[in-house]
Image (cartoon, rainbow, N blue to C red):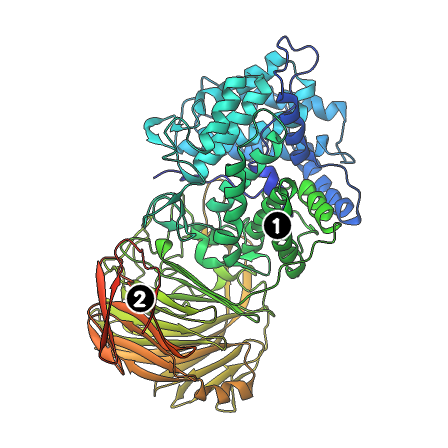
């Protein structure tokens, strides 16, 4: 699998390095002493790249505050650095294949960027420059990273991770190096990233997705540094895979249900089967945005159709999964566990990339991109984009260069751009087994899996508690809890009881890199912008526990049904309604049928529950529910022990409210039925009983009627409910549309050619082959 890297890809400055991290790639050509003259256009690439590293010196109070904090961190790295024969830092030993190589270059990068940033504490200091140059020489001559170095361990470190940081460093000091010195330090880059189209340590591997985009940018920038026109052109061409006839183009859309890159329904996958709009997709977008920026106005500029296609990706693939400036958990893969890349961090990187794209766009595209960026900046009050109160707030690591992002964003906001409005949306991304439901007040998404899409990703010692994130996790995003998942959620939450999942007690499954399931049935139907149904034919990783699970999405909440819950292990089986992070010492009141609930309590035959500042829950059957409020303590190191990503050992304690349905040991065909009502008041919770009616909850069909008589149904096999019959597994919606009836159908298995749906004795043949779970709509 490609791209199994552990380089912290947050653009160097939390509020904006989006353009900086992958962008950091075109550098100042050599000083006047260079023997080789600059090729036409390369100086423009270099100056554009330097902007992305050190900014445009646009004064503001926010820039001053951010720079002061960057000063503190850069000075600490500088003061603790020893330039001699030994390691630069005592805690980062030198040596072949060292897992600390990336961190060495990352720390040096922080020092170099501060040196090159106007007003920085180390800016222009000749003594600091001398130490930076000496450190570069030491790392090169010690073969920590040179053309003599052998790839040992993770290929990514040598071919992408270190080259990016090295180019970042060289960009800031290039005017102080001779062309011979630049050429020397770039020799390992040419060795390990000589061909942006292929994997150096295995040339049979064609690079795809974010890895290809990064290598394209590395080629483009290093070529500009060397004045090598052909290398620049090869880098530009690699974005769209000119040499391969476009087969691995990073912006092409694949019409299939797996494979790295963008897909026709807006999905983005990396590592073949992992939904990744919330990390690798943003890395790719950042690289292309950076290339557009640095080549603009030169003979190497990316073609207009490539730029236009890139602009369109923002609203299609990324924007649906942003809530209050943060990326939704369902599309963040293994990076859930990375302390240095919270949902807000990666959301900031996306914002920075979109701001950068808006600078190069025009007309309606510029307004659209600028409006989205302004919306995310305005809404993110938990981790304000324009503020960096502590560069180590989320990551004690070195990616701390956010000055350009702040400056570009303020430049955009100063134009008076109007933030985009929140628009109700229900979208099904069948090619990555993801969906998103957006209302004006709250949003939701599901973490599910199938034979096509993995349950989770756990590689490079990351995501060590990720066993159940793809087993039906229902992620809710609320306006008064914008930091819910960022506030030490993953190191402290009970990972065995994630909301929406049906699990059992006992040993957890063995962690695997990208485990899938044995079931095809995973997907749903979109009725309109405010309604939809989603289904999962669930089987546990060890195969003993099975269940049919459905979620019905409406403007007021999500109705959750489960049936056929059967397990042979003998362990106790449970379905989790809620497991809410209340923060430190949270005191939100929990009511059950109007009575105060505290501590641990078994609730029998209750009709409704309400959690203060969160919302309501309606119990639609006679389930036994356990309510438990508990304080849980954990560290980020517990869930991420990666060499260059590992979290701290600082303990965090957070209070949680659990609501769990008990199915007992060895259940056979057990079921559940409940509704989750985000932001609902007590009165709204009680009144919601009239919002829907459960029409079926069996292992064959799960269905509900909405208040306007619209039917939403998930069929796991051929069957009937009310006036609808189907020939095979399907998700169906039926309701009034003007003066007639409208039928919406999808194939969640993505295996069938045709579905026959009978409505009031009229049969409709629905072609579903190669639709990849997309909704088909008919008048009936």
The quarter in which the N terminus is drawn is: top left
Question: What residue lies at 53% left-to-right and 53% top-to-bottom?
Answer: 315
Residue of label 2: 536
Which residue is most to the top? Answer: 35
Name the spot of residue 296 as percent of width and height, x first. 62, 31
Q: CA distance from mark 1 to mark 2?
A: 39 Å
Corner quadrant of residue 665: bottom left
Residue 594 circle label? none
Q: Is residue 692 above or below residue 57?
A: below
Residue 222 seen: yes
Residue density around tag 1, few if under 14, some if 14–19, many if 20 or more, within 10 Å: few
Question: What residue lies at 26% left-to-right and 76% top-to-bottom?
Answer: 701
The reply to whether dot 1 and dot 2 touch (C-beta < 8 Å) is no
Residue of label 1: 364
Numbered-mark total: 2
Name the spot of residue 189 as percent of width and height, x first. 49, 23
Q: Nearer the viewer, residue 710 or 70?
A: 710
Q: Nearer the viewer, residue 382 or 759?
A: 759
Secondary structure at badge 2 equals strand
Name the spot of residue 420 as percent of width and height, x first. 62, 59
């Amino acid at each position: 699998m490609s791209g199994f890297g552990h380089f912290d890809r947050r653009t160097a400055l939390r509020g904006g390095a989006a353009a900086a991290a992958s962008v950091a790639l075109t550098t100042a050509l050599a000083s006047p002493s260079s023997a080789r003259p600059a090729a036409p256009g390369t100086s423009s690439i270099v100056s554009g790249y330097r902007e992305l590293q050190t900014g445009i010196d646009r004064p503001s109070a926010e820039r001053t505050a951010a720079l002061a904090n960057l000063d503190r961190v850069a000075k600490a790295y500088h003061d603790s650095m020893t330039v001699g024969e030994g390691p630069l830092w005592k805690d980062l030993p030198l040596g072949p294949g060292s897992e600390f190589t990336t961190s060495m270059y990352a720390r040096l990068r922080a020092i170099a960027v501060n040196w090159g940033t106007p007003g920085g504490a180390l800016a222009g200091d000749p003594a600091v420059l001398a130490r930076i140059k000496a450190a570069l020489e030491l790392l090169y001559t010690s073969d920590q990273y040179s053309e003599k170095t052998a790839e040992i361990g993770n290929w990514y470190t040598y071919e992408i991770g270190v080259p990016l940081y090295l180019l970042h460093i060289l960009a800031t000091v290039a005017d102080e190096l001779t062309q011979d010195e630049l050429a020397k330090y770039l020799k390992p880059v040419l060795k390990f990233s000589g061909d942006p189209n292929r994997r150096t340590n295995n040339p049979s591997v064609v690079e795809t997705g974010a890895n290809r985009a990064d290598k394209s940018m590395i080629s483009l920038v290093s070529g500009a540094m060397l004045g090598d026109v052909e290398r620049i052109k090869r880098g530009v061409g690699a974005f769209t895979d000119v040499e391969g006839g476009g087969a691995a183009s990073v912006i092409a859309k694949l019409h299939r249900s797996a494979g790295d890159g963008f897909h026709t329904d807006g999905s983005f996958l990396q590592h073949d089967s992992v939904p990744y709009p919330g990390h690798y997709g943003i890395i790719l977008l950042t690289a292309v945005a950076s290339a557009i920026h640095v080549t603009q106005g030169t003979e190497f500029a990316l073609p207009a159709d490539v730029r236009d296609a890139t602009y369109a990706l923002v609203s299609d693939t990324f924007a649906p999964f942003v809530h209050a400036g943060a990326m939704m958990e369902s599309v963040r893969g293994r990076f859930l566990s990375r302390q240095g890349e919270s949902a807000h961090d990666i959301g900031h990187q996306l914002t920075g990339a979109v701001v950068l794209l808006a600078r190069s766009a025009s007309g309606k595209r510029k307004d659209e991109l600028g409006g989205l960026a302004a919306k995310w900046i305005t809404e993110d009050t938990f981790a304000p984009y324009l503020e960096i109160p502590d560069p180590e707030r989320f990551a004690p690591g070195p990616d701390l260069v956010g000055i350009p992002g702040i400056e570009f964003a303020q430049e955009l906001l100063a134009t008076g751009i109007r933030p985009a409005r929140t628009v109700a949306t229900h979208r099904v991304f069948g090619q990555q087994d993801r969906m998103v439901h957006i209302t004006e007040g709250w949003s939701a998404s599901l973490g599910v899996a199938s034979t096509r899409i993995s349950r989770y990703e756990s590689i490079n010692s990351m995501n060590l508690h990720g066993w159940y994130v793809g087993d039906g996790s229902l992620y809710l995003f609320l306006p008064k809890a914008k930091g819910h998942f960022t506030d030490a959620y993953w190191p402290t939450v009970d990972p065995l009881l994630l909301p929406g999942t049906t699990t059992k007690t006992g040993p957890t499954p063995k962690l695997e890199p990208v485990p899938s399931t044995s079931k095809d049935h995973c997907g749903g139907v979109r009725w309109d912008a405010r309604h939809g149904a989603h289904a999962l034919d669930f089987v546990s990783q060890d195969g003993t526990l099975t269940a049919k699970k459905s979620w019905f999405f409406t403007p007021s909440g999500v109705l959750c049904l489960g049936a056929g819950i059967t397990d042979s292990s003998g362990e106790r089986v449970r379905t989790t309604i809620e497991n809410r992070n209340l923060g430190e010492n949270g005191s939100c009141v929990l009511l059950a049928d109007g009575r105060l609930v505290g501590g641990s309590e078994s609730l029998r035959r209750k009709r409704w529950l309400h959690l203060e500042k969160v919302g309501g829950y309606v119990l639609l059957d006679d389930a036994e529910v356990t309510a438990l409020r508990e304080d849980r303590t954990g560290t980020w190191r517990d869930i991420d022990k990666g060499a260059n990503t590992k979290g701290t050992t600082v303990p965090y304690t957070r209070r949680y409210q659990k609501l769990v349905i008990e199915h007992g040991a060895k259940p056979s065909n057990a079921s559940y039925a409940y509704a989750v009502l985000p932001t609902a008041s007590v009165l709204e919770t009680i009144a919601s009983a009239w919002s829907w009616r459960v029409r079926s909850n069996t292992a064959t069909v799960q269905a509900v009627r909405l208040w306007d008589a619209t039917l939403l149904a998930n069929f796991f096999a051929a069957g009937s409910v009310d006036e609808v019959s189907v020939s095979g597994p399907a998700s169906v919606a039926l309701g009034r549309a003007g003066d007639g009836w409208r039928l919406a159908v999808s194939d969640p298995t993505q295996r069938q050619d045709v579905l026959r749906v009978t409505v009031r004795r009229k049969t409709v043949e629905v072609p579903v082959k190669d639709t990849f779970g997309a909704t088909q709509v008919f008048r009936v």
